[in-house]
Image (tube, helix red, strand yellow):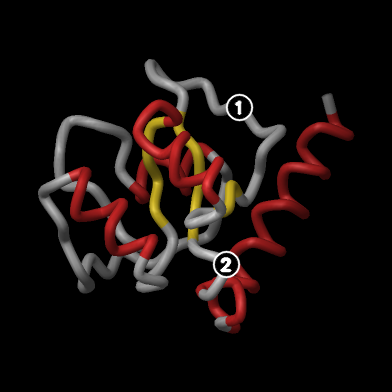
Amino acid sequence: MIPIAADFPTWREWLTRAGANQTTDDRGLKINSTAAVINAAVAARGVALVRNALVAQEIDSGRLVHLMPDARWPVKWAYYIVTSSKALRRYEVTAFHDWIVSYNEHRLAAE
């Protein structure tokens, strides 16, 4: 996962809101530039949590894939979870995708 180090929702906050079990380990790549986060996702380096308006062209062109197009999360701005088509071939990206889709389906069924 490629986090954004800014005043936007963090992966920890997003995963907590999603009810995910997570470690307290904060190791990993920290990127302090939204553009760099998007570029890393386009380069198949991981999954990014970004605002819709910032990745609309990449999604329209096929450079990024919106992993949960029907999901809307209650945050101040609309965020998409995106990755490149190439990254979808990686086990950990597919596992994350499968988990989040399954979680969302269960959550919606419970409402």
Residue at 46%, 24% (x, y): give it. 78
Cα gap from disc 1 to disc 2, whole angstroms: 21 Å
Secondary structure of the residue carrying tag 1 is loop
* Residue extending farthest right: 109
Please give left or right for residue 91 compared with residue 14 in the image. right
Q: Position of residue 58 (x, y in %)?
A: 45, 46
Q: Of 61 and 25, which appears nearest the observer? A: 61
The residue type indicated by label 1 comes to Arg
Few, some or many C-alpha atoms within 10 Å of disc 1 (few <14, some 14-19, many ≥20)? Answer: few
Percent across and percent down for residue 69 are 67, 38
Residue at position x 21%, y 72% from top?
27
Image quadrant containing the N terminus: bottom left
The single residue placed furthest to the top in the displayed view is 76
Judged from this view, the residue extending furthest toward the left is 32
Specify few, some or many for label 2: CA neighbours under 10 Å numbering under 14, 14-19, or 20 or more: some
Q: Is 80 left, or right, of 37 in this rendering?
A: right
In what element is the residue under mark 2? loop
Q: Which mark is residue 107?
A: none
Apparent side of residue 82 relative to residue 44 in the rendered image (left or right)? right
Name the kind of residue labelled 2 in the image: Ser
Quadrant for residue 79, please give it: top left
Residue that appears at 35% across and 69% down = 43
Circle 1 or circle 2, nearest the eye? 2
Residue furthest front as drawn: 61
Q: Which residue is mark 2?
A: 85
Q: Residue at x 28, y 58 (%)?
A: 39
What residue is disc 1 on?
Answer: 72
Tally the marks.
2
Q: In front: 35, or 72? A: 35
